Amino acid sequence: MSTVPVPADGLRLLAEQSVEHAFVLADAAARITWWSPGAAHMFGYDAAQIVGRELSDLFTPEERASGIPAQEIAVALSNDEAEDDRWMQRADGSRLWVTGMLTALRNADGAVAGFGKIMRNRTDLQEQFQTLRNQSTALDQSSRRKDAFLSTLSHELRNPLGPLSNAVQIIRMSVVRPAEIEQALKVIERQIDVLRRLVDDLLDTTRIGAGKLELQLAPITLQALLNEVVEASRPQLQQKRHDLRVMFPEGAIEVIGDRARLNQVFFNLLQNAIKYTPAAGTIWLKMTTEGSEAVIRFEDNGIGIAHDMLPRIFEFFTQAESAQRIAPGGLGIGLALVKELLDLHHGTVQVRSDGVGQGSEFIVRLPLARLHRAG
């Protein structure tokens, strides 16, 4: 097969004028002897700074420590060429993802006269790959959370069915026992309330995600609303023998909001404190004003929250392992729904905890009614 003569001037112009590719020549000892303008642009060294140094100086410290440069040279000597795709290091210490080829250059006798290396900066491609990997990981995590959510949902929906069924049997067998009928009816009412709130939370989550939840705004006195929430939670408080300490100011604190939705917010936060505070614990419900905001605090001396969970506590389908141990089940949507509903009210919710076993505090802030009227 005939060969085409190589135009030396053309190769020189290609190497000198290409900015996207780095062309590097080295001697048989892998010391750099020539450095193209593209290499200077890519790595930040001019020829005077880099000529005479070893090719290995372009590698990251960890790859030099693991012997990767020597391994690449050995492959080139054995196979004439060695491909590489790896992180390399610029003059300023920053890194770039490089694809390239190291070629062993041989003279007419077959002896190695040096090496030639051609490289291209593909950091952009690597970043795209990393973004896709992160998205894939996030989707996997979301899928696992949803699977756990659906599994938990099936149990949560099933839990009230046993008491309801037992209550119905008691009613059927207690035609002449009004006291037993009354007790059975109370069981039914409590379990229906559990189901109703569970279904409401699920429906509201769907509505918010679809942008279809509409608020019915009206003036609300927070003391009255919070007292309603406390009374609705009284059976759970008594069952666990909690000491609830309510601290409200004397003057009425008024906001503009959807009464049912804010009731939902505060009920979820109080129930959260009840559920994750061991028996005979203490819960504080405090309210005050700060500037133009009403501030409501739910504090407890319960199981607390691990530091790594704090940034994710308001995400859907998120539950801490410690919470699952003390109160198995739960859908992981209550706190996320709280945040979404407060966002719709131009309010905020924050969480504080010194760690597991150190209790927790949830702080709700809502614009005062006078701010709405002034606007």
Image (cartoon, helix red, strand yellow):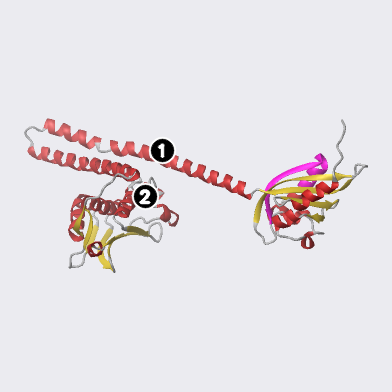
Question: Could you say where residue 67 lies in the image, as x and y percent from the top left?
Answer: 74, 50
Q: Amino acid at mark 2?
A: Ala
Crowding near the residue tagged with mark 2, few <14, some 14–19, many ≥20 C-alpha atoms within 10 Å: some
144 displayed left or right of 179: right
Nearest to the observer: residue 209 or residue 364: 209
Question: What is the tally of numbered marks visible in this picture?
Answer: 2
Question: Could you say where residue 105 lies in the image, as x and y percent from the top left?
Answer: 85, 45
Nearest to the observer: residue 241 or residue 223: 223
User: Is 79 colored magenta in this rendering?
Assistant: yes
Residue occupying the far right of the picture = 109
Question: Could you say where residue 104 lies in the image, as x and y percent from the top left?
Answer: 83, 45
Judging by the rendered image, the residue that carries numbered circle 1 is 147
Separation (CA) of disc 2 from disc 1: 18 Å
Q: Magenta segment, which residues? A: 72-89
Disc 1 is placed on an element classified as: helix
Judging by the rendered image, the residue that carries numbered circle 2 is 323
123 displayed left or right of 112: left
Which dot, 2 or 1, sits closer to the camera? 1
